[in-house]
Image (tube, rainbow, N blue to C red):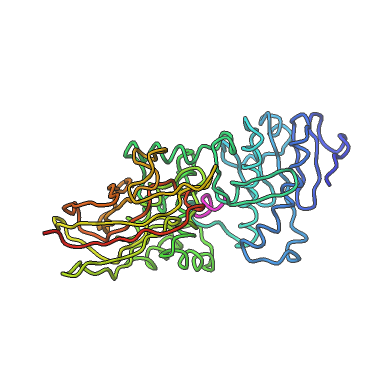
Amino acid sequence: MCSCLSAQELPTGFQRLKGTYVDVITDLPLDDELRALPTLFDTAMPIWCEEFDIQLDEVQDWHVEAYVMLARERFKAAGFIPKKLPDFRYGFQYGNQVWVAEQPSPYYRRHLLLHEGTHWFMNRKFGDHGPPWLMEGTAEWLGTHRWDGKNLTMGVIPKTKTEVEYWGRISLIQQQLADGVAPSLEQILRYDNTAHQNVEAYAWSWAAVIFLRNHPDTKKAFEDLLEQPMKSDGTLTRWLFRRLQSQWPQIRQEWSAMLTELEYGYDPNNGMLAMTRTSQAIGEQPVTLEVAANRSWQTAGVSVTEGDKLVVEASGEFIVGHAPKPWRCEPNGVTLEYYRGEPLGKLMMTISSPQAKEQFSQPIEVTAVGARLEFNASATGELHFRVNESNVGLADNSGTLSLTIQKSE
């Protein structure tokens, strides 16, 4: 437990809350939320250790001073903000000190403390700062949390907007994607040291880290990236570009697919669209496959050419929910509930096309299939299928659909 030290140890108007790894110095009136901050920080230490592969006994002498500021001028006047620091808007980390400007919600105050604490831990671990997208995206990822005053989970995708008051990253991404101004993955990886003066850059760096650390085509490269010497210039980003160079056309499409699905509660473990690169064209014989109801986009293992005339037929019964009782569903879906304009559980299709050129990130095109669809392929690419439901709703589904894909006469 932390304790508030004598006021004589600090200038008038400041109070200190001591923890094992942190001292929190603040000019805010103390309440239970503030008093819990050292415990929050101390609880984060073993999580950071596991994330960055450090034994807890190696960090026993690590300690940071965290300034939680209502009136920034008071901290400047008291000498708690060095003059050499840049003018930061939300928070900052330098050496064994972090600064957090007071926020309109207790959640967002905690988020910023964990965000800056992640910067501090990474700096102690690596001895230097990495590229902006990596440092800010990782800090955003680990700063996004759940906390009940005792138990802490870091690196979560919030289930609802109200769970993370004033955070707003997912809403921002959805809006920019809808407006057609969402940056490409490459643009995000090229962010310079001034990009994060705008909150949009935090949102997109967070999304990039989620994608890179979870997608099967990039996960190993991202893990290996953290084993490289940390440098703040473009060295690490160039290393990643070279490592994934041959895959970038497919990765651009896979990134767009994740953004299309990204909602509150998104779970990358429910499946991320992954192109096989070994798909075969449909011949004279039909292609059959099973599509799991509890997974996101699943490859058919076949490619089509723009203009191909094809027919897809689906059958089977599966479950798309259990409240108040199991919702039995067939490929046309159930009209008791709709998702993105189509019945819940309806079979959907997308043609995944490698993107040869860098461009703004765009939602992928999705076509409703249902029990049967005869169509002319609108693009050249690989067929993927899933049932129509939000990513977060997939986990409690069960059962499969049987598909047949063949040329149309």
On whether residue 138 falls in the magenta region, the answer is yes
Q: Residue furthest left?
A: 409
Q: Position of residue 109 (x, y in %)?
A: 65, 37
Residue depicted at x 65% and y 58%: 48
Quarter placement of the C terminus: bottom left
Q: Which residues are magenta?
A: 134-139
Q: Nearer the viewer, residue 24 or 235?
A: 24
The residue shown at (16%, 56%) is 306
In the rendered structure, the answer to whether residue 55 lies left or right of residue 245 reads: right
Residue 205 at x, y = what percent? 47, 49
**174 sits to left or right of 54:** left
Q: Nearer the viewer, residue 178 or 98?
A: 178
Instruction: Determine whether 247 is above or below 374 in the image.
Output: below
Give residue 325's position: percent from left, percent from top: 53, 45
Q: How many labels, in total?
A: 0
State whether residue 182 is above or below residue 383. above
Residue 117 or residue 234, whichever sits in front: 117
What secondary structure characterizes most of the magenta part? helix
Q: Depth check: 149 or 40 in front?
A: 149
Give above or below for 212 relative to 202.
below
For the point 27% across and 48% down, which residue is it?
367
Give how far across and how far down residue 271 sits, in percent. Answer: 44, 58
Q: Is residue 337 left or right of residue 22?
A: left
**Res 273 → quadrant:** bottom left
Left/right of residue 311 with respect to residue 83 in the rendered view: left
